Amino acid sequence: MHQEYQEDSEYPKLMDNNDPLGRFRQRFYLKKGNIYMCGNSLGLASKDAEDCILQAIEKWKDEAIKIWNVDDHKYYLYSNYLANLMAPLVGADPEEIAITGGTTINIHQAISTFYKPTEDRYKILVDDINFPTDRYAVDSQVRLHGYTPEEAVKVVKSHNLLMNEDDIINAMTDDVAIVLLPTVYYRSAQVLDMVKISKAAKEKGIIIGWDLCHAAGSIEVNLKEVDADFAMWCTYKYLNGGPGSAAALYINRKHFTKLPGLAGWFGNKHNTQFLLKQEFDHQQNASGWQTGTPSVFSMATLEGSLKIMNEAGITNIRRKSLHITGYLMFLIESKLKEYGFAIGNLKEDEKRGGHVCLEHDEGYRISMALKAKGVVPDFRDPNVIRLTPAALYTSYEEVYKMVDILLDIAKTESYKSFNKNRNFVV
Ligand SMILES: *Cc1c(COP(=O)(O)O)cnc(C)c1O
C-alpha cells in the first residue's frame, strides 16, 4: 500500500484536482446523490456508448439491409472492428480476438474446440471458487463426451477463499487435458500469475484457457506474453459495455487452423460466406469462431466504451485503480476496523484486482443500509461487500464520503432495521 494517504477531508479533494483521469468522469452518466461502487458487476453508461448505439440505430433506419454494406462493411465486420479496439487492452493481436456471444457461450465454444479427450488425458482442471457459470459449462462439456463431472472434472481446492498457485500447478497431472481458470477472482479479487501458470501447463502439454471477466479493463493483461491457448471475457463489467453487451473470445494464433467446436456461417471466410455453400470454409483467425449474425445493438455500446478505455490507456487506468482502492483500504483500516470490518482481499498490488472486499458479519444488512444512503455496492455471500472505485468515473471524494457513511451505519447500528431476507439479485 502507498504510504502517503491521509485521513483528512482535504486529501481527497487534492487527489481529485490532480487526477490525470479526472476528465473522463463527465463522460459517464453518474446519478446525482448516488455513489456508484458496482462497476465490477456492471460498468456505468457513457455518452460515448450512447452515441455509438444511436448511430447504429440511425444506420438501420436510413439504410435497412444496406447497414451491412455501408461504411466499409463496418457492421458486417463489427467483430473485427471492435477487436481492433480491444486488442491493446489485453495485449493480443486483433486477429486473435472475436467479439461475439457471451462469456458462458464462449467458454462452451473454446472447450468444445480444444477438448479432445483420450483414454489417458481426459480431465478438465478447475478450482472451487470461480464464478459458477464457468463450472456449469465445464461440467456440461464433459457430459457431452460421455463422462460424469466426478470422473473428468478435477477441482483444485481453495483455502479461505484464496487459491494457492502451486496447488494449481501440482494438480496438472498427465490425465489433465485442459485447465480453465479466472485471472481475477470475482469474490476475493485475487490475481493469479497467468504467465507462471500458463508456462507450467505448456510444459506438461496441457491446453490452458483464462477467464478475464474481472481482469479486462481493470488490470494490465499481456496475452502475447502469457501465450495461453484461449481466453474469454465479458464486456459489461470494467469495460462498461452495458448490460449483456457482446463478449470477447481470444484464440491464440497458433490454433487458427483448428475447426471451431461450434461452427456457424459467420465463421466462414467473408469472401465466400455469401456463396452460401453447404461446406464450411473456416475463416482462419479468431473471427472464424463467430457463429451467427453479429448482435449489433449489443456491440455498439462497446464501441463507445472501448474508445474511452483506449483514450485513457489501460496502464493509467490500472495505476489509478491501485491508488484509489489503496486509499479505500487505508480508510477502512484507520476508521472502520474497530467496528468489526476487515479487508478480505490480498493487499499487495500485483495480487489484487479492481475491487475491495469489505468483510463484516453483518455484511448483508450493512450493504442494504448503504443502498438506503445512496451508495451502490454489491454483496456476495457470506459476508463480503464488494466496493469498486472505478478509475474512470469514481472520485476520491466519493470514497471518502462512503467511508463516512459506513462509519455512521456502524456507529448507529442503523443496519439493524433492515430485514435479513435476501433479494434475488443482491
Ligand atoms: C461475470 C462473469 C461471468 C459472466 O458470464 P456471462 O455469460 O457473461 O453471464 C462468467 N465468468 C466469470 C468468471 C465472471 O466473472
Image (cartoon, rainbow, N blue to C red):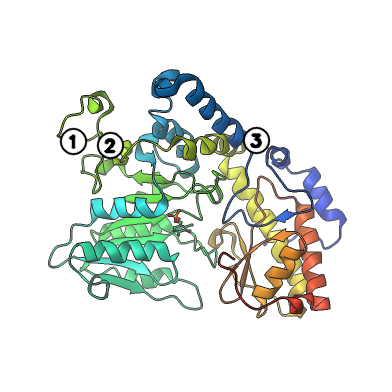
N-terminal label among 1 and 2: 2
**How far apart are the two marked residues, 1 and 3, measured between alpha carbons?**
40 Å
Residue under label 1: 280
The local crowd at label 3, few if under 14, some if 14 to 19, many if 20 or more residues have their Cα within 10 Å, is some
> SS at mark 2?
helix
Q: Earlier in the sequence, mark 2 or mark 3?
A: 3
- Circle 3 residue: 47
Instruction: Work out whether residue 312 or residue 34 is closer to the camera in this orientation and state it.
Output: 34
Give the side of residue 96 with respect to residue 217, left or right. Answer: left
Identify the secondary structure beneath mark 1. Answer: loop
14 left or right of 74 in image: right
Q: Is 35 on the left-hand or right-hand side of 46?
A: right
Q: Hey, which quadrant is residue 163 in on the image? A: bottom left
Cα distance in 3D space between marks 2 and 3: 32 Å
Say what secondary structure mark 3 lies in: helix
**Three-letter code, disc 2:** Gly
Q: Position of residue 123 (x, y in %)?
A: 24, 67
Amino acid type, label 3? Lys
